[in-house]
Image: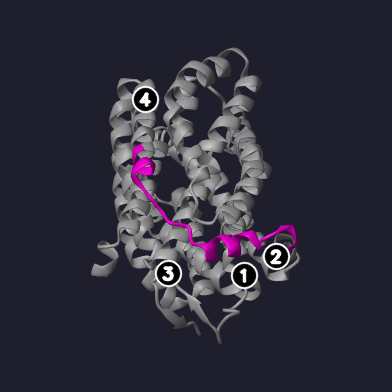
Amino acid sequence: MMNMFRNKNYWFSSGYLFFFFVSWSVWWAFYAIWLNRTLGLSGLQTGTLYSINSTVALIYMLVYGVIEDKLGTRKALIWFQSFLLMGTGPFLIYVYEPLLKSNFFVGAILGAIYLAAAFLAGVGVIEAYSEKLSRKFQFEFGTSRMWGSLGYAMGAFVAGISISISPHLNFWLASAAGFVFFLVNCFYRIEISKEEKEKTSDLDWKSIVHTFKLKRFWLLIIFLFGTSCIYTIYDQQLFPIFYVRHFSNPDLGNQFYGYLNSFQVFLESAMMFAAPFIVNKLGAKRSLTLAGIIMGSRIIGSALVPGAVGISLIKLLHGFETPILLVSIFKYIALNFDSRLSATIYLIGFQVSGQVGVIAFSSLIGTLYDRTGFNFTFLVIGCVVFAFTVYSIFFLSKNKKSDQEIQLGTGKKATVH
């Protein structure tokens, strides 16, 4: 453990994650509220925005995953991300908001092109790059990703206060965090060995296409499609508005949501530190099933618990679900697929499946909410998540490399049973 904290690569990886998530959360945590209250968009319009964002993000992910695996730990995509993060504030204020008011669909498309590249697909690039660093420099990815959760918590905490002053302040703070991300990248020096260049150069479309032909790849996609993507719509599109409506004063609701979001992500950070040990104990498959149980419980629980206190406690389940899901996904990939393709499989298998689900279901769930209200909508989508969680018990693969030594991210060789 102490060796990890003395590892400069661990701290640079953590710095990338921390400032990326600050830049994202300071505006994204209140995105649905901003669209609904500040811009006055309907549930259908909000759902349409999420669908368009996800459609464009899907295209980026398909390209990002292949490029990142070909680059290995080289920083070309990280430089690209840093410039996009710095431009977030000016884009949201001077391009996105005016266009959504004057020409909704033009604004939606241009916004999706920028926001998907920077954040919705960009998050997968940063996480996959950090996971590659963890395997290369022998530290546990989960403990580094913990700093991303801390960054999200700090950004959400500040956002809950600053949005009551002006949403534009949140957007400028996103750019400020992006500038610090840029500085981290300027100071990080990484050596790329001849061996690494050869391994990444060996990857071609034939290797990627072969992965797409594997049955266990598509079984994983189906599980994520039916759980994580539905949960994402609930958590990002519906829950913020639902929570604020428990307060007579919307500004007070926004502020408390910011506090709650911060506390939940601090809890997530602590769990991110513990998640690698939990996942190694349970195994990747059982951990994915556990994540599905938590997701379904939170969605249905939102329809059943009364009052702001009860719904706040339900929100905290997210702090347990996210670390277990994220760490178990990377462990599952390492156990069942070629680890050189980790970025491609993560972005396409996890992120793309989630975005496809958002595209398919955002407008539908938004319409269901407009017609029936929150409680019935939560019960319906919660049952869907539980159904796919049961599916995981029977169809996800057990550890395919159970008789082989694999790299777990700790720098040690271990036999996984």
Residue 342 on image: x %, y %: 57, 61
Q: Can residue 170 be seen at all in this image of the molecule?
A: yes
Image quarter of residue 44:
top right
Q: Residues within 10 Å of mark 3 (few under 14, many from 20)?
A: many
- Observer-nearest residue: 347 or 186? 186
- Sequence-wise, which precedes: disc 4 or disc 3? 4
| Mark 1 lies on residue | 337
- In the picture, the disc for residue 288 is none
Disc 4 marks which amino acid? Trp
At horizontal 64% and vertical 34% (from top left) the residue drawn is 52
Tell me, yes or no, whether the highlighted magenta stretch contains residue 195: yes
Compared to residue 124, the image places residue 416 above or below, namely below
| Mark 4 lies on residue | 172
- Observer-nearest residue: 345 or 376? 345
Q: Which residues are magenta?
A: 183-206
| Mark 3 lies on residue | 409
Residue 226 on image: x %, y %: 62, 57
Distance from the alpha carbon under mark 1 to that under mark 3 = 15 Å
Tell me, yes or no, whether the highlighted magenta stretch contains residue 148: no
At horizontal 51% and vertical 19% (from top left) the residue drawn is 97
